Amino acid sequence: MPVVEREVTRFQHYLAGQGLKLTNERTSLVREIFAIHYHFEADELLFKMKEKHVKISRATIYRTLELLVKSGMVRRVHLGEDHYHYEHITVLVVVV
């Protein structure tokens, strides 16, 4: 299973444990986040999603980022600016 799809499934399991659902917007956002390989900002995600014609609000992005941080899948990073950046945390799966 590709890494991005594995992370979508992982987030879906986390949400189910919280009594929440994996919406189309959340799925699109997780796919975008795990396709990025650098520190990113919430507003950058909003721009990328709009470019791809995904209808998503700024509030949904911030709420989803908070859920991803709580799940341990994304880390919030303060780089000395007046806002946060984020980075995904990929779990490596070793098959023996």
Image: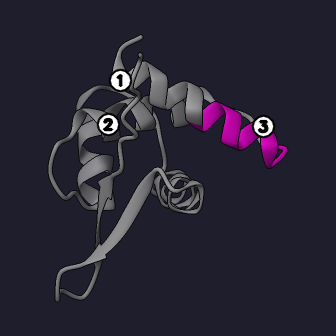
Residue 1 occupies quadrant: top left
Residue at 46 percent of width and 50 percent of height: 73
**Distance CA(mark 1)–CA(mark 3):** 20 Å
Residue at 41 percent of width and 16 percent of height: 96
In screen coordinates, is 40 left or right of 71?
Answer: left
Residue 54 or residue 86, whichever sits in front: 86
User: Closer to the camera: disc 1 or disc 3?
Assistant: 1
Mark 2 vs 1: CB contact within 8 A: yes
Q: Earlier in the sequence, mark 2 or mark 1?
A: 1
Label 3 neighbour load within 10 Å: few <14, some 14-19, many 20+: few
Q: Is residue 40 above or below residue 56?
A: below
Toward the front, the furthest residue is 96
Q: Amino acid at mark 3?
A: Ala
In screen coordinates, is 62 left or right of 18?
Answer: left
Residue under circle 3?
A: 16
How many tags in the picture? Answer: 3
Q: Amino acid at mark 2?
A: Phe
Label 1 neighbour load within 10 Å: few <14, some 14-19, many 20+: some
Disc number for residue 3: 1
Q: SS of the residue at dot 3?
A: helix
Residue 16 occupies quadrant: top right
Q: Which residues are magenta?
A: 11-19
**Distance CA(mark 2)–CA(mark 1):** 8 Å
Q: Residue 77 at x, y = what percent? A: 29, 73
